[in-house]
Image: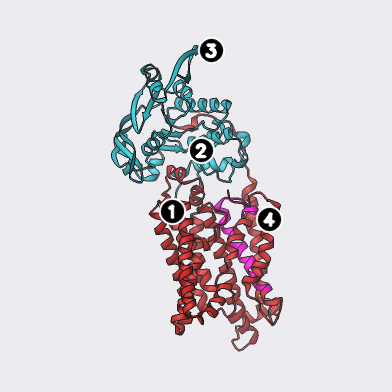
Chain colours: A cyan, B red
Amino acid sequence: MIKLHNITAGYNRVEIIKNINMDFEEGSITSIIGKNGCGKTTLLRTASNLLKPFRGEITIGGRDISRIPNKELAKKVSFLPQLRTVPNITVHNLVMHGRYPYLGFSRTPQKRDKEIVKKAIEHMELDNLINKNVHELSGGQRQKVYLAMILAQDTDIIFLDEPTTYLDINHQLEILEVIKNLKHMGKTIIMVLHDLNSALSSSDRICLMDKGEMVIHDTPQAVFDSREIDRIFRISSSQVSTGDEGTRQYIFYLK
Amino acid sequence: MNMLQESSTQISFNKNSKGYNATVIALLIVLLLIGVFLSISIGSTRISLSEIISAMQQGDITSKTYRIISYVRIPRTLAALLAGCALSVSGAILQSVLNNSLASPGIIGVNAGAGLLAVLIAAFFPAFLNYTTIAAFTGALMAVLLVYFIARRTGASRMAIVLSGVAVSSFIGAMTDTVLTLKPDAAIERTAFLIGGFSGITMGRLSFAGCLIVLAFFIALILGYDMNILTLGDQSAKSLGLNVARVRFVFLILAAMLAGSAISIAGLLGFVGLIVPHVSRIVVGYDNRILIPVSGLLGSIFTLLCDLLARVLFAPFEIPVGIIMSFLGGPFFIYLLIKGRRGLLYD
């Protein structure tokens, strides 16, 4: 269980997020939503220990995250940033990078590392792209390769910063399915999403932020019913049921 | 969460790459040995392979052939081999770590720092001109440390390092120009240092720099995989457990050790550090575990070849090797750019 206690954080001494208290349920998907510049990514980076908070403490299983050695933490928590430097390497080699925290001094992957990488590639259905250069892939394929790398890292907690941004609708939905599969494997997913419908329809919990503060952290239905989304984004929203299973979808429009 | 239980489908991996890389390394080693032989054999006096073997077996210090080989050709060959390897590996490290196609030892202040100390010796301590090599090495290292500590104030990002490198180089360049304005006589020494070359190299001058180059080269080889992780970007690398700031600092020091040592042997031979890593990437790709040794070998071969041409093209006159390098390397680099070969640009 990952817990944030009174977290205040930001950049260059400017506070972006203030006094955040929350915990993330194991084996669930939490989406952080809010307007541009409200501190979503700052919260994600702080919770994953990429950014040191000004005040407060983050714990994993009761241990202060800042006191856990880098490689040990990398076996517990992984983070996929939105903007990345795309290296000029093959799909297989990129996925193998996910095993870095487990490699010894010689940095030579062992049999187990190779097997886990193989499984991660299979799981993401990237078998036919294994020797392709990552640069040659489409945005959606590339995102799946990075998710395979995260899968190979084999952490229980996964942070994703806008994993569906810049993707066409087909790939967006595909990536969201992959994320749901990760949850079914027992992973705890915490992600920033811009698309409100995707966030509400794919998550177990929603964390709505405004001006660096957490407004509400609850189930999608409770957050929708609170009408806080409408207030903060200055929009109106409706809920509809789709398909035979009556899956809930959300539509948003200007008042 | 054990992923081993998830699936059992077999997939095939590219098994050719290891064989290809081994073939490239073997081929380059053969080329290097040919280059070493030619460098020892060719010059104002031509020495055949049998003469070389016989002279070295007899070890007769009174023999002219032995003296030429031991005191002139071998030190010179070793100098070209070491300097070429060091500058190329230094360039490969910097291009990878800073993710910048234009990165070469000069970009982190190595050339400026070495140049200033060389000019200071020539201007104010002419009695210590023999120590120019060590001074140049010290200057290079100090400049890089200054660049890093300035960049660290802003988080030691790649861009911060490049920008502080440009600023520090410019500032040190102004200091050098001020010294040259006040003491114009120092300009002669400076010109020789700027062009670079291997004439008059002795084993004594080589030993210190050679040890540093070999040490830094092997550390870079060991850390090749960490360099690969660093190319994922700071956030991804940190998330994988890499101490980004510390590893980047180690690589900058390694690059400075390599380039500073090379400069202390041969003066400023900057071009090799820019072009050879790019050509190496075309041959073996971007994996630093193979790129580092291939860059080192190619750099040695290229520098040996240029030095050989410098010696024989207008014999008995000798052209500074830096000029040959630019004449050969410049057009070749432009050719590669125009052809737009995949993998040339680091992006």
Residue that label 3 marks? A243
Examine the rendered structure and indicate whether residue B220 appears above or below residue A114: below
Question: What is the spatial separation of the Cα atoms under label 4 and label 2, in whole angstroms?
Answer: 33 Å
The numbered mark at residue B336 is 4
Question: What is the spatial separation of the Cα atoms under label 3 and label 2, in whole angstroms?
Answer: 33 Å
- The answer to whether tags 1 and 3 share a subunit is no
- Residue B217's spot in the image, x, y percent? 51, 62
- Residue B165's spot in the image, x, y percent? 47, 60
Q: Are marks 1 and 3 in contact (CB under 8 Å)?
A: no
Nearer mark to the viewer, of 1 and 3 = 3
Label 1: few (<14), some (14–19) or many (≥20) C-alpha neighbours in 10 Å: some
Question: What is the spatial separation of the Cα atoms under label 1 and label 4, in whole angstroms?
Answer: 32 Å
Q: Are marks 3 and 2 in contact (CB under 8 Å)?
A: no
Per the image, label 3 sits on a secondary structure element best described as: loop
Stretch of the chain drawn in magenta: B280-309
User: Which residue is the extreme one toward the bottom?
Assistant: B62
Q: Are marks 2 and 1 in contact (CB under 8 Å)?
A: no
Q: Say if the magenta span includes residue B140.
A: no
Q: Chain of mark 3?
A: A
- Residue A165's spot in the image, x, y percent? 52, 32
**Type of amino acid at the residue the image marks with label 2:** Met
Residue that label 2 marks? A149
Which residue is painted at 46% across and 76% down in the image? B179
Q: Splitting the image into 4 quarters, where does residue B326 fall?
A: bottom right
Nearer mark to the viewer, of 4 and 2 = 4
Q: Mark 1 or mark 4: which comes first in sequence?
A: 1
Q: Main secondary structure of the magenta part?
A: helix
Q: Chain of mark 1?
A: B
Nearer mark to the viewer, of 3 and 2 = 3
Q: Quadrant of the C terminus of chain A?
A: top left
